[in-house]
Amino acid sequence: MTRNIVLLSWLAVCLGVTGCETRRHEPQNATAMKLPTEPPKRPLGMKALEVKPGATPFSVDDVTQYVRTHRLARMVGDLAQLQVESVEYITAREVTSRLQGVSTGLPDSQRLAFAVIRGPLYISTPTKGKPVAFERGYALFDVATGNLLMSGTLDKAKQGQGKQPQR
Amino acid sequence: MFVQRRFGSRVMPFVMLSFLLGEVDRARAYSCGDPSSGHCYGVNAWTQGNEYFGAYTDIVQVAMTCPSGCGGFVDNEIWLIDDSSSNCTSNQFGMCWVEAGTLVLEGGSPTYFWADARPGTGNTFNSHYLGGVDPIGTVDHYMLIKDGRTTPNPYLVFIYNDSHSTLYNGTSSVAGTGGCGSPLPQMTGKRILIGQELAGSPSAANNASANSDNYTRNIWAVQALDSAYVFWYNAQTAAGGVTSANPPTASWTQNPGAPGAPEGGQFTTSCCR
């Protein structure tokens, strides 16, 4: 009888005061650190292209010149062989769709320049090892500022392609 | 002039030559851009625990340059890596990862960035360039955390300073379907790296550089993020494996768990002058 009273009392305290639901999320032997809750800043990118007045602020040549002189993140290999296939002006929402769900961190309606780069592009991994060759990659620019916002890979090179080990 | 007076003018060419050789030695050429071998690293690897649900480090902003002709970049950052789950070993890289840090590309200025390589075989690797960094000396916080509130679990990335005047965040890509089919399970963090990555093979005069930088509060999440929105963590307590390609130069300057050391120890990197 006494044991039941103790058990019921414990249950009441647990559910009513301390909240078992909350306690379930608190691991033992760990320290808590709160995450930032303020709205984040909008990604600004890094300085890249000069914006020209008119409907097409950058040409294919402008982007080609940029990617041949600036090594994008994780890229190795000869930049001179890179070619820009296309530069399209699309919204952030369309970019997310083309990149299979990737979030740009920008408003859906934001106008961006999506450049498709033909390689091979050699991309390194976070550890020492042979980089992987991709047939195509992309670079994403802010139409208003010319800043580079994102870069990445599209299609992996087929076997036999991308065997030009120059620096 | 003192040397010239004391030893005569015939000694001067030798003195100048030895001075120049000293300068060349201090700013050694490096080769970190070969597609057959990849970049160079000065990093520490954490491998304790079964799954790392997240990773965090404090990195001080220091002077970083990659002048025109450096042919690559230098960055200070943190990585969370999965190179054992089948969905990751079968992607184009043979591994998945999420990374965040400060990067300087050729001819550019230091920029916050984050990137990820997800499971699957479609669009796999995406790098996000966020904006210019805080003044030199500022301690910035870099956090990667698995979000347990949605399925499949993405990873959230936070880069911020104490006042939150800098606060960027991002959400890793999870789908990884290769363009069709159901979303694949997200990566499982098995390894954490902190440190510096160096790319390029310039002449010594065009070397990238990064002043000596400290990584402190090296901690890892023990569970995924839930509705409490708290990063539950343990501190790194073991030194783990250090890679120092010289450059980048890297070492523990205060071992994790040592008396008086900062939480998670103090790891230090530098490059290349």
Image (cartoon, rainbow, N blue to C red):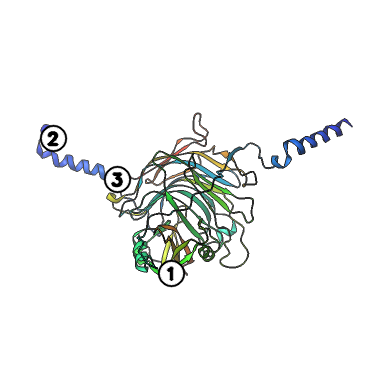
Q: Give the residue at mark 3.
A: B27
Task: Look at the numbered disc 2 and give the secondary structure of its residue.
Answer: loop
Q: Amino acid at mark 1?
A: Gln
| Placement of the N terminus of chain B among the 4 image quadrants | top left
Whole-number angstrom distance, CA of label 3 to CA of label 2: 26 Å
Residue A116 placement: quadrant = bottom left
Query: Between residues A89 and A23, which one lies in front from this camera angle?
Result: A89
In this picture, residue A69 sits left or right of residue A151: left
Give the chain letter at badge 3.
B
Q: What x and y, as percent, mark residue A138?
A: 44, 64
Whole-number angstrom distance, CA of label 1 to CA of label 2: 60 Å
Q: Amino acid at mark 3?
A: Ala
Whole-number angstrom distance, CA of label 1 to CA of label 3: 36 Å
Question: Looking at the picture, do discs 1 and 3 lie on one chain?
Answer: no
Report the residue that reaches farthest toward the top.
Answer: B259
Q: Give the residue at mark 1.
A: A161
Q: Give the residue at mark 2.
A: B1
Q: Amino acid at mark 2?
A: Met
